[in-house]
Image (spheres, rainbow, N blue to C red):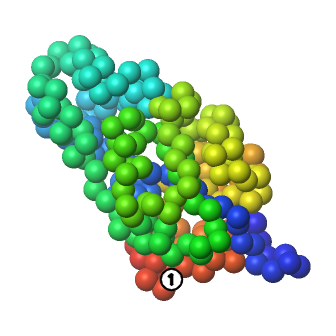
């Protein structure tokens, strides 16, 4: 999207991913290290097993207890459920700039979230007072489908009550951005070039100087 005769493009709504946007690095990259440390396994060897389980976990196939049970069976380990849950949920490392970005959005712009996520993390995110301005939380485990499936974006548009051309979506995964753009959504990849990408895609909303100068990746 670029400026037009009507002036710089200002979206009706902005939606953001969670992991990799509100966290430093992907949540999974830190979680697999934490769980590997818990059971004494090399994270690189554990990663394929972990990601395969997470694909079903994020689609709502089972809960935390089910994830723990399947993880133990797949790895031949037996960590106690409480320790397993603590290591998994404790893998979050926040990116303060993303919370500041939410706070900087104009009041007339709707805000939402679309994330491949699991139930207990969703509860933590949804209840975070810093995200109280978000009007819609669309989580993969609650809709039964993960990004980049088009149904995930359709669910987001429905929850926000917007048309594709009215929405900007921020994600750290290039495949998810590409899928959004295929639907006519202005996708902005969050990487080291995020301030430039935002400025080009959303000229009607200027980033505060601190966020424009921040290191995003």
**Residue 76 position within the rendered picture, expressed as x and y whole percent measured from the top left:** 17, 15
Left or right, 32 with reference to 196: left
Q: Residue at x 21, y 34 (%)?
A: 85
Residue 28 location, quadrant? top left
In the structure shown, which secondary structural element does the residue marked by tag 1 occupy?
loop
Q: Residue at x 73, y 53 (%)?
A: 162
In the image as oriented, which residue stretches furthest toward the right? 5
Q: Kindly identify which residue carries mark 1.
A: 208
Work out whether 95 lies above or below 157: below
**Residue 51 position within the rendered picture, expressed as x and y whole percent measured from the top left:** 38, 30
Left or right, 171 with reference to 177: left
**Residue 121 position within the rendered picture, expressed as x and y whole percent measured from the top left:** 35, 42
Q: Residue at x 30, y 19 (%)?
A: 66
**Residue 82 position within the rendered picture, expressed as x and y whole percent measured from the top left:** 14, 31
Left or right, 95 with reference to 44: right
Work out whether 41 lies above or below 16: above
- Which image quarter is the C terminus in? bottom left
> How many numbered marks have been drawn onto this rendered protein structure?
1
User: Could you tell me if residue 155 is visible in this image?
Assistant: yes
Binning the other alpha carbons within 10 Å of mark 1 as few (below 14), some (14 to 19) or many (20 upward) gives few
User: Could you tell me if residue 178 is visible in this image?
Assistant: no
Q: Residue at x 76, y 66 (%)?
A: 1
């Amino acid at each position: 999207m670029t400026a037009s005769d009507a002036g710089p493009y200002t979206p009706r709504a902005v939606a953001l991913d969670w992991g990799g946007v509100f966290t430093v690095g992907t949540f999974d990259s830190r979680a697999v290290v934490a769980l590997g440390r818990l059971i004494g396994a090399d994270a690189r060897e554990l990663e394929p097993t972990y990601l395969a389980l997470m694909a079903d976990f994020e689609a709502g196939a089972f809960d935390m207890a089910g994830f723990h049970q399947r993880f133990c069976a797949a790895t031949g380990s037996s960590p106690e459920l409480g320790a397993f849950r603590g290591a998994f949920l404790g893998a979050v490392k926040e990116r303060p700039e993303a919370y500041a970005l939410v706070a900087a959005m104009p009041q007339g712009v709707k805000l939402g979230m679309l994330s491949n996520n699991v139930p207990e993390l969703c509860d933590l995110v949804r209840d975070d007072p810093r995200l109280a301005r978000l009007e819609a939380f669309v989580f993969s485990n609650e809709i039964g489908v993960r990004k980049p499936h088009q149904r995930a974006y359709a669910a987001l548009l429905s929850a926000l009550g917007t048309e594709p051309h009215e929405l900007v979506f921020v994600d750290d995964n290039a495949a998810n951005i590409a899928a959004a753009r295929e639907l006519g959504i202005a996708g902005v990849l969050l990487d080291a070039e995020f301030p430039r990408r935002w400025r080009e895609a959303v000229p009607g909303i200027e980033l505060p100087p601190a966020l424009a100068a921040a290191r995003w990746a």
